[in-house]
Image: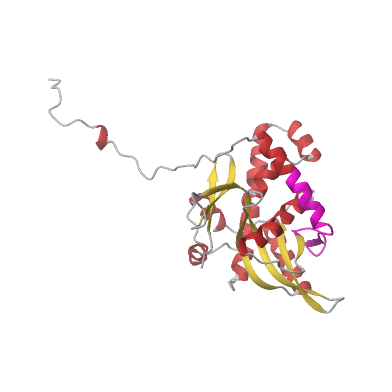
């Protein structure tokens, strides 16, 4: 019986990559993430903003959005695990539960929630009241050997359909951005293909939903992807564009030093006398 492959997220200079290890592979696979691939997807609004902004302003805005999005994701992950998240910040015990070691990220997670983060979590709470989710898994790493990409989906869960009066299986991806970018549908469609390949299951009736948090009076907006097959076709076209711009792409792993010491440079012996 074959064992399930091991999937590891890597931070590289070229964006997010995943390392796939398994007995069925002669060598490890290094696959770009769906989000890395989707940097090749056209975004007119984003391009205009970049053209009319200073590089330093762009960098700060991207870093702020990224770290706030990460914090909201981690707070939701903790709630799914049955934890209470305090507005004063994530606790040391919860940091250990999440297995986080990045000092900058840990320090930010332990800070009090910003207004934007708090609104997002209120939105998640309001969404849960309406859709009554039953979570199967969260932060699931999946990959497609057929199309050579990987990713992490936010949640696989059953959601209550009030009209049909039944639960339906969904992949849900949460965002804190105010604008619903067209690439989001492509991203979550790629996860539907990847989860089928990773677990060798059809997941019959599996639906896709994008949850925008911190938006509207109820602090959320939930969109069901109507044409997942079309979204997947666009993703694969974008993958070809990305492949063309990154031929034979291989990740350069960011190696961080663990220590520094002078001892290895010091030669043994007597010093020159300056008297």
Q: Can residue 93 be seen by looking at this rendering?
A: yes
Residue situated in front as seen by the camera: 260 or 196: 196
Relative to 80, is 45 on the left or the right? right
User: Residue at the location (71% across, 68% down)?
Assistant: 203
User: For the point 81% across and 59% down, which residue is it?
Assistant: 225
Which residue is most to the right? Answer: 163
Span of residues in magenta: 211-237
Compared across the picture, whether 249 is left or right of 162 comes to: left
Residue plotted at (85% across, 77% down): 164
Q: Position of residue 237 (x, y in %)?
A: 75, 43
Q: Position of residue 25 (x, y in %)?
A: 51, 53
Q: Colour scheme of this structure image? A: secondary structure
Q: In this view, does 253 lie above or below 199?
A: above
Was residue 233 drawn as part of the magenta stretch in this picture?
yes
Q: Is residue 73 magenta?
A: no
Q: Is residue 130 above or below residue 151?
A: below
Q: Is the residue 64 above or below the residue 211 in the image?
A: above
Query: As drawn, which residue projects farthest toward the bottom?
Result: 165
Q: How many numbered discs sit on the rendered protein?
A: 0
**Residue 58 percent coordinates (x, y):** 68, 37
Residue 84 % position (x, y):
60, 71
Q: Quadrant of the C terminus?
A: top left
Q: Can residue 181 be seen in this view?
A: no
Q: Hey, which quadrant is residue 76 in on the image?
A: bottom right
């Amino acid at each position: 019986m074959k064992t399930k492959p091991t999937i590891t997220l890597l931070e590289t200079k070229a964006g997010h990559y995943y390392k796939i290890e398994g007995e069925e592979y002669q060598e490890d696979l290094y696959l770009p993430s769906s989000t890395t691939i989707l940097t090749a997807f056209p975004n007119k609004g984003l391009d205009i903003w970049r053209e009319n902004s200073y590089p330093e302003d762009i960098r700060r805005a991207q870093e702020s959005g990224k770290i706030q999005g990460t914090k909201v994701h981690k707070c939701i992950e903790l709630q799914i695990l049955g934890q209470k998240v305090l507005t004063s910040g994530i606790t040391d015990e919860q940091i250990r539960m999440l297995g986080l070691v990045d000092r900058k990220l840990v320090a930010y997670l332990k800070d009090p929630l910003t207004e934007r983060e708090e609104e997002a979590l209120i939105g998640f709470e309001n969404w849960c009241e309406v859709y009554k989710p039953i979570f199967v898994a969260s932060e699931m790493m999946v990959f497609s050997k057929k199309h050579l990409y990987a990713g992490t989906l936010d949640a696989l869960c059953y959601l209550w359909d009030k009209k049909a009066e039944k639960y339906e299986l969904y992949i849900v991806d949460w965002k804190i951005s105010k604008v619903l970018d067209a690439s989001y549908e492509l991203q979550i469609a790629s996860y539907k293909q990847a989860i089928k390949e990773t677990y060798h299951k059809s997941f019959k009736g599996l639906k896709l939903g994008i949850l925008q948090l911190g938006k509207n009076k109820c602090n959320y907006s939930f969109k069901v992807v109507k044409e997942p097959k079309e979204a997947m076709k666009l993703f694969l076209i974008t993958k070809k564009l990305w492949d063309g711009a990154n031929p034979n792409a291989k990740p350069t792993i960011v190696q961080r030093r663990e220590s520094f010491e002078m001892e290895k440079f010091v030669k043994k012996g007597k010093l020159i006398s300056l008297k």
